[in-house]
Image: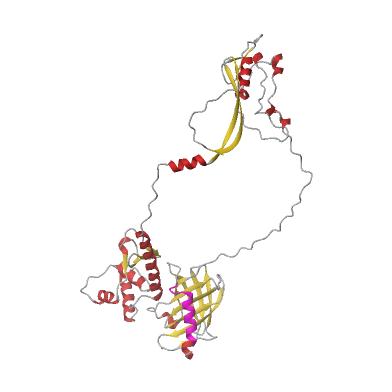
Amino acid sequence: MNSSVASVVRGEFLFRDLLLVDVGGELKRHPRASEGEIKRYLEDKESKDQVAHWYEAQLVHYGLQRSKDKNTAKVRLQQALNQKKLKAAPPHLVDMEASMKREYAAAVRKAKTPSKPLPAAGKGTKRARDEEELPVARSKKTKVSVQIGDVNIDIEHSTSSKKPVSRAKATPTSRRPKQDTKNAASARAPPTTPTPYKMANSGATLNYDSLQDVPSSSNTSLPTATPRVRPKQTARKSVIGFGGPPSSQQSTIKPDPYDQASHFPSSPAPTTSTSIKPEPTHHATSSPPQINITGVYNILTPHPHLSTLSSKASRLFLAVDNSTNKIWGSFELGWYGGTIKIDQIATNRAVCFGWRARDHEKPGNMRFGKECVGEMEFFGDQEVRGVFHNLLPEAVHFEGKRRAGPLWSGKSVYAYEKEWEGFPKEAYGR
C-alpha cells in the first residue's frame, strides 16, 4: 500500500489496493467477503461473530438493500445466499471497481515518477550581460543653475531617448556650461536697493531685485513647427513663494514659456459626425438547466403479486446518452428483468418508454413488441414514478428514489443498446 497516494472515492466506496465500503468512519471500512466466508459466519455457530457494520458493508458490496440492524442484515444475506446471489458482485459494481483500480494505479505511477530538479542558479554573469544589452529609456537632461545669494535655483529640462545600457566605468561629473557661469556671475552682483523677502519652502533670505532674466539655452528651446509634449520640470523655482508685494523691477522677469497655455495649439472641434448604426439586439433564449438522472434507483410497487417478493430487490438502472438525448437502462422487478429505452429527456412530466423483458423463472420466455410500453416521470434528479403496461395483466405502478453515490448505472449506453437489439436476435435466431 502506497501511503503517499490518496484513495479513490466514489460515494461510500473507496479503493486503496482493494475495494472498501465506508459505513461510518476509519474503523468501519470493510472489503468484500467471499461467499464461503459469509456462509461460515452465518451458519457456523462456533466461529466468532462479526460486528453489525461488517454485515451492513457486505449488503452494500453485493448490491442488496442495506440495514444497520445486525439481525436484519443477516436475514438478507442468508436469503441472497440461498438464491445464489453471492457468487459475484453485481456487474455495475464490478465495472466501477475496475475503473477505480485503473485510476488508483495511474496515481501510484505518477507518485513514483521522480520530479525533475530545478536548474541551479548561476553566478548571474549571463543575466547581467543580458541586462546590459537591453535597451532602456534614458532621459537627456540640460541643467541651468542660478545662484542668488546663498540660494541655488536649478532648472532641468529632460528629453527621453532609447539607447542600450552600458556598464558605467566611472562616475560622471556634471559640468556647468559657460553660459550658466556667465548668468551666475551676473546674478551675484549686489542689488542697489535690496528688498528682502522670504521663500515659502526654505528659511533663506532672497533679494527680489537681484533676479535676472534667465535665457533659455539652445537645447531647451521649443520647436515652433511641431508641438511637443511638455517635459517634466524639476526646477525648484516652481515652489518658490514670495510673502510681500512685487516691486517695480518684477517686470524684468520673463514668464516661463512652458506656462503659456497659448503655446500649445488647441485641437479643432470636429465638424463632421459619424453616425453609428445601432446593432440589433439579440435576445438569447436561456435553455433549461440540465438534470442528470443517471444512476441506480430503488423502486417499490404496490402490485399484489410483486410486493410479496421482499427478498427480491427491485431496481431501476438509467444512463443518459447526451449525444442523442435518449435514456437507456434496465430494470429488475420481481421475477422479471429487462431493458428499457426512452426517446426523450424530460423532468416533471411523463414520458413514454419501451421495454423488453425476460422471465427469470421460465428461461427462454421473453417479451418484446409494440405493446411493451409504459410511462415514467422524473421529479428532479432524485425521484421517479411510472407504470409498466402489459407486463402483467394489470398495470404495474412503481415509484423509487436514486441511491446515493456516483452517477453511474453499472453499464455504458452501448451495452444497454446491444442488450436491446439482442432480444429479437435471440428469439428469431438471426
**Magenta stretch holds residue 410:** yes
* Residue farthest top in this picture: 192
> Residue 415 location in percent, x, y?
46, 77
Of residues 171 and 38, which is closer to you in this image? 171
Of residues 234 and 394, which is closer to you in this image? 234
Task: Name above or below for residue 142 compared with residue 276.
Answer: above
Which residue is depicted at the point 37% across and 52% down? 117
> Residue 334 location in percent, x, y?
42, 81
> Residue 288 location in percent, x, y?
58, 65
Of residues 13 and 404, which is closer to you in this image? 13
> Residue 320 location in percent, x, y?
51, 72
Q: Can residue 210 be seen by looking at this rendering?
A: yes
* Residue farthest left in this picture: 46
The prevailing secondary structure element of the residues shown in magenta is helix
**Magenta stretch holds residue 219:** no
Please identify the quadrant where the N terminus is shown. Answer: bottom left
Residue 299 placement: quadrant: bottom left
Figure colour scheme? secondary structure
Which residue is depicted at the point 44% across and 74% down? 411
Of residues 39 and 202, which is closer to you in this image? 202
Task: Name above or below for residue 247 compared with residue 137.
Answer: above
Which residue is depicted at the point 39% across and 72% down? 93
Residue 185 placement: quadrant: top right
- Left or right, residue 56 beside residue 271: left
Residue stretch rendered in magenta on the structure: 409-424
- Left or right, residue 42 beside residue 423: left
Q: Can residue 392 be seen by looking at this rendering?
A: no
* Residue farthest bottom in this picture: 428
